[in-house]
Image (tube, helix red, strand yellow):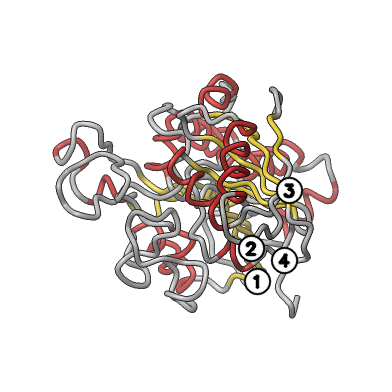
Amino acid sequence: MNGERETVSGIMSICGKGVLPYLLMFFLLISIGVSGETCVFRIYHYQRTIPPILLESGLDIASVKPGVYVDVVLDEDELDALLEKIPYFHIEKYETESELKQRLDSEYRTYPEIVTLLNNYEMNYSTICKLYDIGDAWEKTVGGSTYNANYESRDILMLKVSDNPGIDEEEPEILFIGVHHAREPISGEMVLYIINELLTGYGSNPDYTRWVDDYELYFIPVLNPDGFSVVLSGDNIWWRKNCRDNDGNKSYIASNDGVDLNRNYGWYWGGTGSSSNPYDEIYRGTGPFSEPEVLAIKKLANKHNFYISLSFHTYGEICPVPLRL
């Protein structure tokens, strides 16, 4: 991310009561350069884990670098509220909405382009891959454009790559998933990259050939096609959730719409790190597996015995692995 970095030093350590904290807050706001639009702010904390005060503030966390910083998405009002809670952190305005829109990579493939690509893969590599429709995204479940003119009827597509893709063999199964979160398009590109490497390298690359011959590999490039389309269309580049109309008023991506698909699974549903408030970016939904996208994964998992499931995100420079792997 390029562009001017407007930095503010967290000199407001503990100033006590009186006018000094308010004066410092005033100069802090001037230094940050509030623009009136939603921005990404980088909060440096240099602690091993994210400080509890940040987690408990209900922030829209876009990414993290463990032990160094947290990137959060804030508008002007949210920034004011945050500065009252954490006056002693070092904060930097990292990128504005207008800057990010200008840099939204046109080479990210849209959902229709991905559908075409997957169909072409199945046609051109029919001996080692097969395309499956594993369910409907939320907009399609309510009738698409008949419910709201902005809605479409999108499917959740999965490509199986194996030496006998139409047969369920006794081979280890591995699942790859991209775009749980709408504003993480590169996670889908990662899945597509792996698919392309395996298909084009089969027969010439011994490692790729062994993987295709000895495993059953399942790829879902875009689990959240509705939200993904909101971002790539530019309608809302900050959109994270799916497009469920939570209050049933037939609105389109209102601030209280959508469910965080990654918080909708049944394992410890409702725990720390999720919210019961539809306005929050980490809203978990009305119950476990309430969302058709997540329910599609549950049904898929019930039919298969996945040895490994890999979900790609662009949340931070981390690669978490199961403790028992």
- The disc placed on residue 49 is 4
Q: Which mark is residue 174?
A: 2
> Which mark's residue is nearer the viewer, 2 or 4?
4
Residue 287's disc number: none
Residue 307 marker: 1
Q: Amino acid at mark 2?
A: Ile
Question: Of helix, strand and loop, which one carries label 2?
Answer: strand
The numbered mark, 2 or 4, whose residue comes first in the sequence reads 4
Q: What is the spatial separation of the Cα atoms under label 3 and label 4, in whole angstroms?
A: 22 Å
Secondary element at image label 1: strand
- For disc 1, the neighbor class at 10 Å (few under 14, some 14 to 19, many from 20) is few
SS assignment at label 4: loop
Q: Is residue 287 above or below residue 87?
A: below
Q: Earlier in the sequence, mark 3 or mark 4?
A: 3
What is the distance, in whole Å, between disc 3 and disc 1 at their CAs?
50 Å
Q: CA distance from mark 1 to mark 4?
A: 30 Å
Residue type (three-letter) at the residue carrying disc 3: Ile
Q: Give how far across and how far down residue 211 sits, in percent.
A: 75, 56
The picture quadrant where one finds residue 294 is: bottom left
Front-lying residue, 234 or 120: 234
Q: Earlier in the sequence, mark 1 or mark 4?
A: 4
Q: Residue furthest front?
A: 18
Task: Name the residue that disc number 3 marks.
Answer: 11
Q: Nearer the viewer, mark 3 or mark 4?
A: 3
Q: Residue at x 78, y 53 (%)?
A: 68
Q: Amino acid at mark 1?
A: Tyr
